[in-house]
Image (cartoon, rainbow, N blue to C red):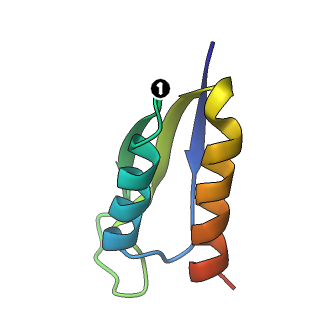
Amino acid sequence: METREKIEFTNLPLAVYREIASHLRQLEGVKVELIPQPSSQFDYQQSQIAGLRVDYTQDVTQQMEQILAYYRDRYTS
């Protein structure tokens, strides 16, 4: 059974979101989609990406959480 989750990191740059997506896609059964920023106004203080939409199976949950914890620790306060 697949689970769908939206993952957001505040003010994370596009390049880092792409890195996270690439890292998660290495797990078998994981599909990742970048969610574009809905705002039509460009703002240097706001990320170009609103978050990630991740579909995954339960057997990769622990690995996925470890990857996300790494990025959470590294890029958020």
Q: Is residue 64 above or below residue 11?
A: above
Picture quadrant where residue 5 is located: top right
Give the left or right position of residue 42, taking residue 5 as reference.
left
| Residue beneath the point at 42% across and 86% down | 45
Split into 4 quadrants, where in the image is the C terminus? bottom right
Disc 1 crowd rating (10 Å Cα; few below 14, some 14-19, many 20+) is: some
**Residue 44: where, in percent of width, then height?**
34, 87
| Residue beneath the point at 55% across and 29% down | 56
Q: Secondary structure at mark 1?
A: loop
> How many numbered marks does the figure carry?
1
Residue bearing the label numbered 1: 29
Give the left or right position of residue 11, taking residue 3 as reference.
left
- Amino acid under disc 1: Gly
Picture quadrant where residue 25 is located: top left
Q: Nearer the viewer, residue 43 or 2?
A: 2
| Residue beneath the point at 35% across and 52% down | 22
Q: Is residue 52 above or below residue 1?
A: below
Q: Nearer the viewer, residue 75 or 46?
A: 75
Give the left or right position of residue 61, taking residue 11 as reference.
right
**Residue 1: where, in percent of width, then height?**
63, 12
Q: Is residue 7 above or below residue 40?
A: above
Q: Nearer the viewer, residue 19 or 4?
A: 19
Give the left or right position of residue 8, taking residue 46 as reference.
right
**Residue 20: where, in percent of width, then height?**
44, 59
| Residue beneath the point at 39% across and 49% down | 35
Picture quadrant where residue 18 is located: bottom left
Q: Nearer the viewer, residue 28 or 43?
A: 28
